[in-house]
Structures are given as structure tokens and as C-alpha cells.
Amino acid sequence: MPKRILQGVVTSDKNEQTITVLVERRFKHPLLQKTVRKSKKYRAHDEHNKFKVGDTVRIEECAPISKTKRWTVVVEAAA
């Protein structure tokens, strides 16, 4: 099964080797046909602490690293 890759914006880099990434998805409401925006935060492993708040990054699903971390940063996404 392929690993999921998501794109989002870094909202926090305060923890050591960890960043918080806000991923937003858009979809059309089934009944109202209105575009709905939903967002979710993921904690991702940043080995070298090189990503800062506001950066756009891609994260990839991985084996659990800690209680809350199940994602790693793949590469900085082109804006």
C-alpha cells in the first residue's frame, strides 16, 4: 500500500525535531454543492530543524516515531 503524501503550511516549529503542519482540503458538499474547506494539523518529524513557520512542505506517512508523530517531512514544496 502506498504511503500518503500531503502538502501543508508549517504552523509551529517550537519543539525539537518536530513541526506542526496545517493541511487544508477542499471538497464540494454533497447536498448543497458548496465548496467546503476543512483543515487538520499533523505533527511531522523534521530531522535537522530546517523548516520554519510559514514554509510550505510535503509530509509522508511513516511508522510511529512517538505518541503523536506518524509523518516525516519529505521536501519543501514549491510555492
Image (tube, grey):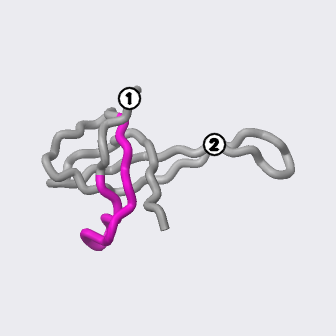
Residue 73: x, y in percent?
A: 30, 49
How far from the left and from the top, in percent, is residue 32?
85, 45
Mark number, residue 26: 2
50, above or below 66, in the image: above
Residue 4 in the figure: left or right of residue 76: right
Q: What stretch is highlighted in magenta?
A: 56-72
Q: Would you say 31 lies left or right of 45 here?
A: right
Residue indicated by mark 1 = 78
Secondary structure of the residue carrying tag 1 is loop
Residue depicted at 33% across the width and 50% down the height: 20
* Disc with the residue nearer the chain's start (1 vs 2): 2
Residue 51 is situated, as x and y percent measured from the top left of the image, at 23, 39
Is residue 56 shown left or right of residue 6?
left
Question: How many numbered marks, from 0 up?
Answer: 2
- Asked if 50 appears above or below 1 in the picture, the reply is above
Which of the 4 image quarters holds residue 12? top left
18 up-or-down from 55: above or below: below
The kind of residue on which mark 1 rests is Ala
Is-magenta flag for residue 57?
A: yes
Q: In this view, does 46 lie to the left or right of 7?
A: left
